[in-house]
Every structure is written in structure tokens, then in C-alpha cells.
Image: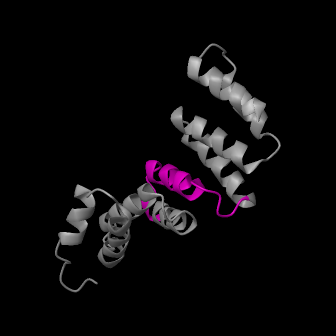
Amino acid sequence: PPAAREAATAELFRDRADWLALYRAGAAGGDPSALYVLGAALYREEDLTGAAAAFEEASRSAEGHPFLGFARGLVRFREGRPEEALPLFIEETEANPDFLPAWRNAAILASRLGLYGEARRLAGEYAARAEEEDEAIRAILSAPVPQGIR
């Protein structure tokens, strides 16, 4: 849409002070894609609260929207809520199975949360799809699982 292009151009060149207002105006109609773009702009500006609100509003009307689960997971993680981020990364792997960053983030986060079996499953899915080896994924797949944990 023209409003989104104008906002992106204004943000890129910073030649307009109202560039963020242009994103907001584009999202005012509630279009999930416009809300996603607004959320991404707010995220880049470190406005996690605003980004979360835009992503959540988009998710209410666009289940399965590409990259929305991933974006929501990033915000939750940055807000210090990793246990809420993990299911969002997993949601993204289901909606967008070829998007490797979702598999990678989910595997690493599951490992950090002590969900070793789930971490290995997610890391295996990543490894099966990836063209190149990833050191963090390799570490998850090769690490011994602590006694009594599956």
C-alpha cells in the first residue's frame, strides 16, 4: 500500500519527523499486515510495549500470519518472559515450517528452559531443514541429557 511505502521510505531516510505516525496511520484500519509492519517499526525503535500491542492486535485477526508468532516471541523474550516466548516460536514453526530462525530460537530457548527433550526435537527439525550446520544446534543435539530428564 502507498502509506506503507511512504512510511518505510521516511523511516529509511529519516527525512520526515512524522515517519512513525505514517506507520500508525497505515495500521489504523486494523489490517494485520499493516499492524505487523507498525510492530516491526516500534520494535526497531526499542518500544517493546508498542510493538507487543501492534503484534497482538494483528494476531487477533490473522491467525497463521507469516512471521507474527516469531515477532511476538521476540518481544516476549526481550521482555524477560521466555516461558511465553517458546510457544510463540513453536507456533511460528507450525505456521511457517521453512522459516529456520523460528526453529533455532525455539530449540535454544527450550534448552535454556531445561526442556531438553523438546530442545532436541526442535534442534533436529532445524538440522533437517538447514543447508549449513549451526554451532548452537549442534551443541543441543550432542549434549548429554541430564539424568532423570527426557
Q: Which residue sits at x=51%, y=49%?
A: 75
Vertical side of 119 occupied by 15: above or below: above
Q: In the image, residue 93 lies at what x, y percent?
A: 50, 65
Q: Residue furthest bottom?
A: 148
Quadrant occupied by the N terminus: top right
Q: Nearer the viewer, residue 57 or 139?
A: 139
Q: Nearer the viewer, residue 131 or 11?
A: 131
Quadrant occupied by the C terminus: bottom left
Vertical side of 99 occupied by 140: above or below: below
* Horizontal side of residue 38 vs 150, given as left or right: right
Q: Residue furthest top?
A: 15
Vertical side of 82 occupied by 45: above or below: above
Q: Disc count in the image?
A: 0
Vertical side of 2 occupied by 133: above or below: below
Q: Nearer the viewer, residue 88 or 78?
A: 88
* Horizontal side of residue 3 vs 76, given as left or right: right
Q: Which residue sits at x=55%, y=42%?
A: 48
Q: In the image, residue 17 lies at what x, y percent?
A: 66, 16
Residues drawn in magenta:
62-83
Q: Quadrant of residue 22?
A: top right
Q: Which residue sits at x=71%, y=25%?
A: 6
Q: Residue furthest right?
A: 29
* Magenta span contains residue 71: yes
Q: In the image, residue 67 lies at what x, y percent?
A: 57, 54
Q: Which residue sits at x=76%, y=30%?
A: 3
The colour scheme of the drawn protein is one colour
